[in-house]
Structure formats: C-alpha cells, structure tokens
Image (cartoon, grey):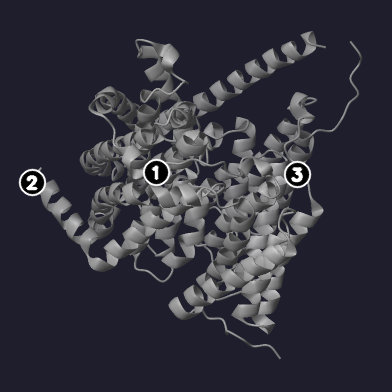
C-alpha cells in the first residue's frame, strides 16, 4: 500500500512536469474539441494527432493521446445531449434522454450531470487500475508464448465479433489486418515480405497512414454530401448548468451503478463501449420505480451510460498497458504509438517505464479535473462549434492529414499510403465490412506471429501445446464459445427476419 | 410467392474479394520459405492467414443470401466527390514537390471543398485561403515541417 502511494506520488510529479502537463492539456482540449465536432470521433482525432507524437518523448506522447481519448469521449456527450447527434456510437444511448432534457430546457443540467458522472467513474476506474495492474503483472509474467498467443487470439476474436456487422465479416477484417501487419522485414529472418519492391515498405506499413486512411479519408468519402450531419441550433447558458440538489441526489446511484457496469465490461476484452452504455441504460430503466420516464428526459438515463462509458474507457487501459493486448481500436492506436517510440507494452512496462505508467494514471486525474474546469466556461463555444458545417470541416482536416502524415517520415510516400488505405477502407465499408478490426489485427499481427512461432519452437512443433497449457486452453475455449454464440444468435435473427419478410410479401 | 431471381449481393463480392486476397497471401507466402512447425520460415504465417481467409471468404459467399435490406442503400457512390477528395491529396503530393507548402495547402483544401455540392467555388476559395494561413502558421512557423514554403519555377 505504502509503495503504491509512493508510486502514485511519483506519477503526479511526472504528470505535473510543465512539459508533460502542457501536452496533456493540449490533448484534452483537442480531444474535447474534435469530440464536439460533428462527424469526427476519437479515432479520427487520435489519428490526426498521431504524427505529433513522433517529435515527442514517450511520456508526453502517451499523455497527449490519452487526453484526446477521454476529451473526445466527454465531447461526444455534448453533441448527444444538445443536438441529438450521436457523434460517437457509445453516446447513442445518451441521446435518448439527453435530448428530451434539452428540449425541456434542462440541457445544461444534463451536461453537468454527464460531467460529474464521467469524473466519478474515471476516478473509480483509476483506483481499479492502480490496484489490479500490479496483480495482473505478477500473473502476466508467468505466461509463456502459448498462453500469450491464445490470449491475443481471444482478444482479436472478441474485437472482431463484438464490432457491428456480422461476426464473420469482423473476423475477415481482423485477418486482413494481420496480413497488413506482415508487410515489411521479417524480424526473425530478415526476409522482405510483400514489399512489392517499394523501399518505403521495408519498415512495414506506416501506422499513421493506415489510421488516417481508414478512419479519416474513408470516412470523408463516405460522409460527404450526406445531409444527416448538419446541426440544428441549441442554446445553453452558464447559469443553466448548475444542477439542483435533487438532480444530484437522483443521479448519484445511477452513476455508481453505471460505473460498476462499465468496470465489469471493462474487464471483458472486446465488449465495446456501445454495448456497455446500452446495458447500463437498460439496467437503470429496469430497476427504476417509474420506468415510463425513460426516453422522455430522465437524468438517470444520462448519468448511468455516461458513467459506464468512462469507467470502461479507464479499465480498458489495464490489458493494453499490462499485457500489451488492446481491447479496442482506440487502445490499439495508443499501443501503436508506444511501439513507434520503441516501447513494448507488457508486464515489464510498469517496472521498466514507471514514468509512463504512473504518469499516465496521474494525468487521467489531472486531465479530468481540467476537463471539468474547461467545460463550464467553454460550453458556449462548444455550442457554436457544433454548428460548423461538415463541408468546411473535412477539407480542413484533409490538410492536417496530408501535412501530418508527411511529417512522420518526411516522405510523400506516406500520403500515397493514405490515399490507398482511404480507397481500400471506402470499398470495404461499401461492402459493409467493419473497419476497426483491421487496426486491431495490424497492431497485434507481428506479436501474434512471434508468439505462435515461439510456442511451437518450444514445444517442438506440437500444435497440442495450445491445449495442454490450461490457461491457453481456457482462452481458446472462451474464444470458440464466443464465436459460436454470435453465429447462432446471428443465424437465428436472420431466420426470424426472413420469416417476417416472407409473410409480409 | 414469385420465384426470386438470383442476384449477386455485396456479401458475394465481399467474400470473393477476401478469398482472392487470401489466395494472394498463400501464393506470396510460398515464394518465401514456409518451413516446418518447429522451425517456421517467413512464409508460414502469411500462408496460414491466407488459407483461413480463403476458407472464411468462401464461407461468406456460400452463406450470402439475397439480402433483404439490399434495396435500402445508405451508400451512394459519387464520382465527383470521390475524385475531388482523392485528387486533393494527389495535388498535395505534386505541389509539395513542385510548388511548396503554400500552394500545396491551398490546393488540398480548395479541391477537397469542391467535393461537397453545397460549397460554392467562392466559399471553397476563402476556406482554402484561411486554412493556408493557418497551415503556414502551424506547420512552417510552429513545427518547422520539412517542406519549402515556396518553390515554384
């Protein structure tokens, strides 16, 4: 316990260093801003800022990206509550009660409740992270390559099947990501694989270019000329934001329950934040004394899902940092940024780079306090920003994408990569493939391959090694069960749909 | 009930595309050394991933039914918009080499803005002017990006 406090104090000192604090603040502000802007999610924001991390030290780089992450998560709630715009899918549920509250003139209160919910949930998530990470480290250090391979496979399957779209499509996209991860020089033998004679591909595909292509350019190609993203007007003044005692009392337990739901789902890799918020909302409406209020402006319907999203976002950092296995594409991106810096996340991270781990934890706290301080006075500006039309936003973003990706290697070939992946992403989403699993596969690919090779080397080529190690066998079984459930559920709903379809003909 | 005419759906094309991709990976993997289970060559993993892609891609083709929601399309291809967005980045590449940061920044924003039918040419022009100023301020003056400001001629 004492040691944890010492570490935490150290973390706060790291996070409060002017240079680190500055980048953390920068990340929070930009994340908040981009989270508010219609049509841009956290993934786009982090992709656009990824080039900046090239010129930074690892600590400020990670603090900044994390800041973007929770800044955007909070920013997304603003659009959901004030304009009924689910900028970021997890906030779709927040719209249900947030927007009716705005129509009743209580939008400001809803925003501050969302803010309080996010702060409390994050704080709880941080506590869990502090307590469980060291525990997980001791377990993780005992894992061999067979176990790591199976856990990664499980993570990949979870990420693939839980994203929207059919599980089969998700798995196919993960495999596509794995293939993309192969491009470049093979670490073991030095063989050049799938480089097509292009020297710029010897180091592999540029992560930044991949992200910007898939989550920037492809998104723009898809969204341009679609009117759905234009915003309506809403007015919130500072004075409207103060919640009454009754409001707080009513929201407190929903916040706590939402936090617990988020924590629980955070512990399960692959369960996306969208499912988490839906479950938190469903739980609230189930146990409410008068559930008919839900959907017509119940504060609980804002408090619980927002709390769950932030708690989950926090807990998601644990497997990412401690095991080096990201649960979702956002975490994969943070992991990728660390690897660009030459740091491999994993059980050794806490002991080898305590500044990153404890600094990150402390910066979560500082960043969230800052987010609260920032959003109260800035709310008027956010409301104005919500009205910036998409047709001005995406051309400006393209400029940042082009210059940003060029600056990662000072090579215009990176811009070519962005164009290629933009078109690939556009074609794939036209064929209704989910894009996020590609990133997961790409980041984990090289590690999956390495552990697979090593596990079989150690076991002298016996494939049974993945089943004879109990931990590994459990994760494989879990993964298979998960896929099978999804397939069965999917087949059942399709069968039902087709019956409805036939009877209506 | 009328007999439904067979039509290829997006899932047929998607599955076939993935199977082809897998085939490419297997063929490519075979040109590197495959090796054995105990001592894998660089071609093993790509070939393995490729085989799974082929199998699952074909499975997708096989299970793709006549999609019910196919008619409710949320996806309309628009050649002009796509051309403008891709063209803006191509212009950026060309002008970075031959024109410098100012021209490249202007071109990328101006051309991309034309992708949206609601943007008038004058609006696109002024947006591009504003963004060029911001770009020079942030990238050239602030972050000293390795691009010349002006290299025309």
Residue B108 in the image: above or below residue A176 = below
Instruction: Rate crowding at label 1 as few (under 14), some (14 to 19) or many (20 or more) other CA atoms within 10 Å.
Output: many
Query: Going by the image, does A61 lie left or right of A431?
Result: left
Q: Same chain, marks 3 and 2?
A: no
The single residue placed furthest to the bottom in the displayed view is B153
Q: Nearer the viewer, mark 3 or mark 1?
A: 1
| Secondary structure of residue under mark 2 | helix
Instruction: Rate crowding at label 2 as few (under 14), some (14 to 19) or many (20 or more) other CA atoms within 10 Å.
Output: few
Mark 2 to mark 1: distance in Å? 33 Å
Q: Quadrant of the C terminus of chain A?
A: top right
Instruction: Rate crowding at label 3 as few (under 14), some (14 to 19) or many (20 or more) other CA atoms within 10 Å.
Output: some
Q: Position of residue A497 (x, y in %)?
A: 70, 16
Q: Pointers 3 and 2 in contact (CB under 8 A)?
A: no
The single residue placed furthest to the top in the displayed view is A503
What is the number of the mark on residue B17?
Answer: 3
Q: Which residue is mark 1?
A: A74
């Amino acid at each position: 316990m004492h040691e944890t406090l010492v570490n935490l104090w150290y973390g706060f000192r790291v996070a409060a260093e002017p240079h680190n604090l500055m980048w953390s603040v920068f990340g929070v502000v930009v994340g908040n801003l981009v989270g508010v802007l219609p049509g841009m999610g956290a993934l786009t924001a982090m992709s656009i800022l990824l080039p900046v991390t090239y010129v930074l030290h690892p600590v400020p780089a990670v603090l900044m990206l994390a800041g973007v992450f929770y800044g955007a998560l909070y920013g997304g709630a603003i659009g959901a509550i004030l304009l009924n715009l689910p900028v970021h899918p997890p906030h779709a549920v927040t719209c249900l009660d947030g927007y009716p509250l705005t129509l009743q003139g209580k939008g400001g209160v809803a925003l501050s409740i969302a803010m309080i919910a996010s702060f409390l949930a994050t704080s709880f998530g941080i506590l869990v992270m502090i307590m469980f990470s060291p525990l997980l480290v001791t377990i993780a250090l005992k894992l061999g390559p067979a176990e790591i391979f199976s856990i990664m496979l499980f993570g990949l399957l979870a990420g693939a099947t839980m994203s929207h779209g059919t599980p089969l499509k998700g798995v196919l996209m993960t495999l596509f990501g794995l293939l993309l991860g192969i491009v470049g020089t093979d670490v073991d033998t030095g063989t050049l694989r799938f480089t097509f004679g292009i020297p710029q591909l010897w180091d592999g595909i540029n992560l930044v270019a991949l992200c910007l292509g898939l989550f920037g350019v492809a998104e723009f190609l898809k969204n341009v000329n679609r009117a759905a993203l234009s915003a309506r007007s809403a007015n919130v003044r500072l004075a409207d934001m103060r919640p009454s005692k009754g409001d707080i009392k009513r929201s407190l337990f929903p916040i706590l329950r939402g936090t617990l739901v988020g924590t629980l789902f955070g512990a399960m890799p692959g369960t996306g934040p969208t499912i988490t918020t839906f479950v938190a909302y469903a739980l609230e409406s189930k146990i409410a004394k008068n559930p008919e209020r839900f959907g017509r402006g119940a504060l609980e319907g804002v408090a619980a899902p927002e709390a769950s999203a932030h708690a989950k976002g926090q807990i998601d950092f644990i497997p990412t940092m401690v095991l080096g296995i990201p649960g979702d594409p956002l975490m994969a991106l943070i992991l990728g940024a660390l690897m660009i810096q030459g740091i491999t996340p994993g059980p050794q991270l806490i002991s080898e780079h305590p500044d990153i781990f404890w600094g990150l934890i402390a910066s979560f706290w500082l960043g969230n306090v800052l987010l609260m301080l920032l959003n109260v006075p800035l709310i008027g500006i956010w409301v104005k920003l919500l009205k910036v039309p998409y047709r001005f936003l995406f051309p400006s973003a393209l400029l940042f994408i082009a210059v940003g990706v060029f600056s990662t290697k000072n090579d215009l070939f990176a811009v070519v990569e962005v164009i290629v992946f933009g078109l690939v992403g556009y074609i794939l989403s036209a064929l209704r493939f989910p894009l996020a699993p590609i990133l997961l596969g790409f980041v984990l690919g090289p590690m999956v391959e390495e552990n697979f090779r090593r596990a079989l080397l150690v076991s002298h080529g016996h494939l049974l090694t993945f089943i004879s190690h109990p931990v590994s066998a459990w994760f494989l079984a879990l993964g298979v069960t998960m896929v099978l459930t999804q397939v069965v559920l999917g087949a059942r709903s399709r069968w039902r749909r087709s019956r409805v379809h036939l009877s209506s003909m | 009930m009328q007999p439904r005419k067979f039509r290829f759906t997006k899932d047929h094309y998607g599955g076939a595309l993935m199977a082809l991709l897998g085939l490419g990976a297997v063929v490519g993997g075979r040109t590197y050394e495959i090796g054995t289970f105990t001592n894998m060559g660089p071609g093993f993993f790509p070939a393995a991933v490729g085989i799974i892609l082929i199998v699952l891609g074909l499975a997708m083709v096989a299970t793709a039914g006549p999609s019910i929601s196919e008619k409710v399309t949320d996806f309309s291809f628009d050649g002009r918009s796509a051309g403008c967005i891709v063209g803006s980045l191509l212009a950026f590449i060309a002008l970075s080499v031959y024109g410098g940061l100012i021209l490249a920044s202007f071109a990328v924003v101006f051309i991309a803005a034309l992708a949206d039918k609601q943007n008038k040419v004058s609006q696109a022009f002024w947006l591009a002017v504003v963004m060029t100023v911001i770009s020079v301020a942030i990238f050239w003056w602030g972050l000293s990006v390795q691009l010349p400001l002006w290299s025309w001629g």
